[in-house]
Image (tube, grey):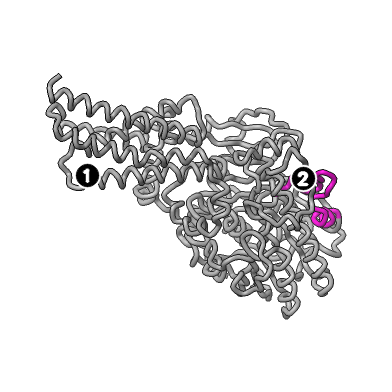
Amino acid sequence: MDNGNKKVQKFFDITAVMVVFMAVKFVVYYYLIEWSVYSFVYTVISIAITLGLYYSLGNSRMKHKKLIFGLVYIGFSIFMFADVMYFNYYNQTVSIEQFWQLGNVAKVPESFVATLIPLSVFILLDIPIVLHKFGKMAKECTHIDEIKPRAGTVRVAAVIVLLLIAAMNPLKNPGIAKITRDEFFINHINDIIINTVGKLANEDLSRDEVLRIVQANTTSGVAHDLSGIAKGRNVIIIQIEAMQNFVIGRSYNGVELTPNLNRLISSESLYFDNFYTNVGKGNTADAEFSMLNSLYPGTDRECYTLYETNTFRGLPWLLKKEGYSTTAFHGYDGSFWNRENAYPYQGIDEFYSIEDLNDDDIIGLGISDKSVFRQAADILEKKDGKFFSFLVTLTNHHPYNMDEALCEVPVKEEDEGSKFASYIQTVRYTDDAIGQFIEDLKEKGLYDNSIIVMYGDHHGLNKDMDDNDIYMTRFLGKEYRYEDMFNIPLIINIPRSGINRTVSTVGGQIDILPTLANLLGIELDKRYICGQDIVNVEEGLVAFSAYIEDGSFITDGAIYEMSREQIYENGRAWEPGSGRELDARDYVRYYERTAALKEASRQLLKQNMIPAL
């Protein structure tokens, strides 16, 4: 074999070694982000694209090509790792928009570590090996006469053009749409196009068109039941971290999980048992934003950052117009989710965070719920006149770490060491904290003249993480599905009202403002409201944006899951509870309605259309 043939052989030997390592990398990646029969195809496409990059750089006469390749390879390896982490929690791959949220992720390191999948480390382990092999390949390439740089450049350019066409999918081919959604490179090229050129190309709707959409897709209610029953009362709202509805009214190993919430439900309260989270990528912050304003949060980032300085006419502003003072409490950093900057624009005048409160009792992420509630009660007692108080709990925050001495629920042997077991311990603690807070309000003479609203912000046990589906299916005695995961409690306690009712109409955080406005007897400009009063409507509807594909929704008697390629006909519908399959075509009008309302919310926020009160 002559010297030229030996170099060709060596070049291809080096390439073969790299293909093996890349194959392992991409197989692990696709396995961790939902393996399917198509994953082998995606693996081949991804390896071919990567080899194209190796080939073009290795055969070029570009200076610093080793450095360029190294940075690119490390970059997309980190992006793959981020995809896996994000998919493990959100059931979706990461968008470039979410990289702006890294600051918030860094503030919850325990939650970040808890989502780490050991197998995902293989995505990073090949980096030094592949970089070393690339150096050898580049050296061999420059001495192989058969390889023509100009022809290689043309081929690479052709591949890039094909990738762009596939990412944009101009003919909306379903097969290409699936590849666009799931193959690593094409997926992220598509994401970049959507978040750059796509946003520039999107035309804004006129104010009249947006208001028409809102009016056409919301209902005014069929009655005015309970209107004004809480008029003039103090308004206390408690957003309960990671509180799911399955714990309500249940016991575990002989211990009642939420005795205090159960007592409130059985007394003078409205209890909404078919209530769901409608958060976006801002999780807790999105829950409170949607509750305060009756708008759907964005699907890219948290609204408190994107629309910090917009004008709003949400619940705090409405109550200020009625003479209320407005206060918020949270036991962590005021900068978390940009609350300290956003709250004034939400109409909240005083914000007490960890910087302003006594932090001598820390559990998990921040000040314990019992301490925050105790300090809040002391502050509220000194208020003159009517007040609105918004409290966000924290102890029940993922990953649910709490000292064993504080745990009150004996764990069964079969559940020991599980996230499920840790979760029910912190749920019980937060329930105790709420019970003590209610007693403090009574002792300080604040309870009888208040309306107290309690709701969960989002799920606590992701069905696709930590084997939660196994533990939850055993606990519930049925398959743990999305309707269980997204189902959160809403309890509206109205002392001295004589009202005790369970409302089973589907609702979500977007519906709290119009429901409360009716109970408080407050006039509401419904042109800027995308939710509905679920005490007085005949049919409920809530759209989902996170943890399940955008376009999914739940209505009375049906839940619909959008397909990953965003084709309605490829999605599925089923009956909540029984899981009985339904014909998705029967529910397309609900999809169209939720899509219209989400677009209206986006336009209202993007164009800052809401006028000040």
Which dot marks residue 411?
A: 2
Span of residues in magenta: 244-266
Q: Total of numbered circles in the picture?
A: 2
For the residue pair 395 and 586, the one nearer the viewer reads as 395
For disc 1, the neighbor class at 10 Å (few under 14, some 14 to 19, many from 20) is some
Point out residue 122 in the picture as x, y percentages from the top left corner: 45, 38
Where is mark 1, residue-wise?
65
Residue 61 at least partly seen: yes
Left or right: residue 460 versus residue 309 is: right
- Say above or below: 252 vs 359: above
Position of the N terminus, as image quadrant, is: top left
Snapshot quadrant of residue 110: bottom right
Q: Is residue 523 visible?
A: no
| Residue at 36% in and 48% down | 201
Residue 260 lies within the magenta run: yes
Query: Is 330 part of what is drawn in magenta?
Result: no
> Identity of the amino acid at label 2?
Val
